[in-house]
Image (tube, rainbow, N blue to C red):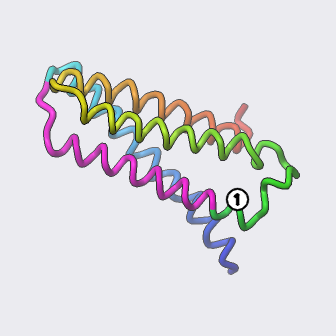
Amino acid sequence: MTMLTVLYEAHSGWRYLVILVLVLAILRALWGWLRQGEWGGLDNRLGLITTIVIDIQLLLGIVVWIMQQQWMGFNPLAAWEHPVTMILTAAAAHITSSRVKKQATSADKFRTATIGYIIAGVLLALGVARITRVF
């Protein structure tokens, strides 16, 4: 098994953890928003974990992209569309995390987290769906 194979398999498998954590972050934020809950330590940790797992996925993807020399353009989808979409996903997660910290009330934090993580989730879904040729 080559290093590239190991990294590719890690990238492919890690996506399920990314999806799980992102769905949990969305559901927790939506639940808190709808139930008018108090923002707490669990919510802060979940936001941090969400950005960390997305960052790890992005890093694995960039390493695989470089090792496979995808930018050469043999497959435009893998060469540019998927990496750019995933960078936008990571950016959305980081922007969401930053904006949540600036909100004064729990309701505003939950609303910002819900909307931001949904945007990140949509970008993630588009990037994964396109690379797996769903549409």
Q: Amino acid at mark 1?
A: Trp
Near mark 1 (Cα within 10 A), the count class, few <14, some 14-19 or many ≥20, is some
Quadrant of the image containing the C terminus: top right
In this rendering, position of residue 20 left or right of residue 45? right
Q: Position of residue 8 (x, y in %)?
A: 64, 64
Q: Position of residue 22 (x, y in %)?
A: 40, 41
| Residue drawn at 41 percent across, 41 percent down | 94
Q: Position of residue 111 (x, y in %)?
A: 29, 22
| 3 vs 81: above or below | below
Instruction: Please state the extent of the stretch shown in magenta in the rendering.
Output: 37-62
| Residue drawn at 78 percent across, 56 percent down | 70
| Residue 40 lies in quadrant | top left
| Residue drawn at 70 percent across, 43 percent down | 131
13 within the magenta span: no
| 80 vs 59: above or below | above
Q: Secondary structure at mark 1?
A: helix
57 within the magenta span: yes
| Residue tagged 1 | 65
In this rendering, position of residue 122 left or right of residue 33? right
In this rendering, position of residue 41 left or right of residue 102? left
| Residue drawn at 40 percent across, 29 percent down | 116
> Does the magenta stretch mainly form a helix, a strand or a loop?
helix
- Nearest the eye: 121 or 87: 87
